Amino acid sequence: KNEVEQSPQNLTAQEGEFITINCSYSVGISALHWLQQHPGGGIVSLFMLSSGKKKHGRLIATINIQEKHSSLHITASHPRDSAVYICAVSPNGATNKLIFGTGTLLAVQP
Amino acid sequence: NAGVTQTPKFQVLKTGQSMTLQCAQDMNHNSMYWYRQDPGMGLRLIYYSASEGTTDKGEVPNGYNVSRLNKREFSLRLESAAPSQTSVYFCASDRGPLNEQFFGPGTRLTVL
């Protein structure tokens, strides 16, 4: 079983919809990261959080440390949000060694 | 600022050939990383350098060597390439533990 699991693996939405991507992990962590990978490969860090909630524009990330779960929400989705969203964790005692989920492929249709 | 740069962008090797992937960052970051990305799998850490002068193995180090040439540059060497090393390789850097990582554009390597 992977230490970081994401769901769903694939998601298709209509423009304007509210989107939720989930991440569950099985190890103790110091932080959780959400990243975005566009077609063509570039990877960009969206959030790093260790508690509570962070918001940047239309993106919101939440984490529940007790439940070992995080969610990434996209409000008013747009076709330019189409990408792979990747969850990664910094494990306790090895914070340099990120463990990555396999990603969620999001397609937002106009 | 260029951020994190990688060369080459694409490479095709024959089994047994060697090559070095180059990575440089201009953000004065302390830590640098090499990952590989394979279909259906998450990014996996090959090697990392927590600071200039140090390197450590990640999850999948076999078949690779690294050099932290200076604070800016971190290279990954394949001494004798194998088809199992066909992958997309990403270099990344950050200021240190629990900081945002910045990724290079990736190198797509095919080993025939």
Image (cartoon, coloured by chain):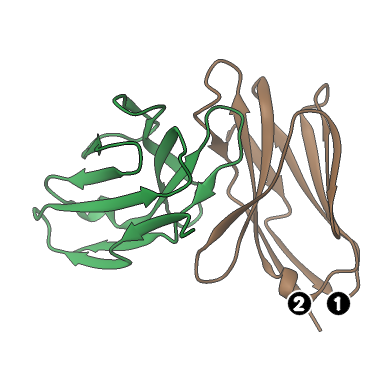
Chain colours: A brown, B green
User: Residue B102, how many percent across, how many down?
Assistant: 53, 48
User: Residue A81, how many percent across, how many down?
Assistant: 74, 69
Disc ID at residue A79: 2
For disc 1, the chain is: A
Residue B76 vertical position relative to residue B87 in the rendered view, above or below: above
Instruction: Give left or right: position of A20 versus A11.
Output: right
- Pick the front one: A63 or A49: A49
How far is disc 2 from disc 1 in space, using C-alphas?
Answer: 6 Å
Which part of the image, by quadrant, shows the C terminus of chain B? bottom left
CB atoms at circles 2 and 1 under 8 Å apart?
A: yes
Classify mark 1: residues with Cα within 10 Å, few (<14), some (14-19) or many (20+): some
For disc 2, the chain is: A
Classify mark 2: residues with Cα within 10 Å, few (<14), some (14-19) or many (20+): some
Disc ID at residue B36: none
Instruction: Give left or right: position of B61 versus B38.
Output: left
Classify residue A98 by image quadrant. Answer: top right
User: Residue A66, how many percent across, how many down?
Assistant: 83, 21
Classify residue A11 by image quadrant. Answer: bottom right
Count of numbered circles on the image: 2
Q: Decide which of tag 2 and tag 1 comes sooner along the chain.
A: 1
Residue A35 vertical position relative to residue B70 in the rendered view, above or below: below
- Pick the front one: A32 or A45: A45
Give the farthest residue toward the top.
A93
Find numbered disc 1 in the image and state the secondary structure of the residue it sits on: loop
> What residue is disc 1 on?
A15
Query: Amino acid under label 1?
Result: Glu
Query: Amino acid under label 2?
Result: Pro
Instruction: Give left or right: position of B52 versus A85.
Output: left
- Pick the front one: A70 or A51: A51
User: Residue B86, how many percent across, how many down?
Assistant: 29, 57
Say which residue appears at 58% left-offset and 49% top-offset: A102
Find numbered disc 2 in the image and state the secondary structure of the residue it sits on: helix
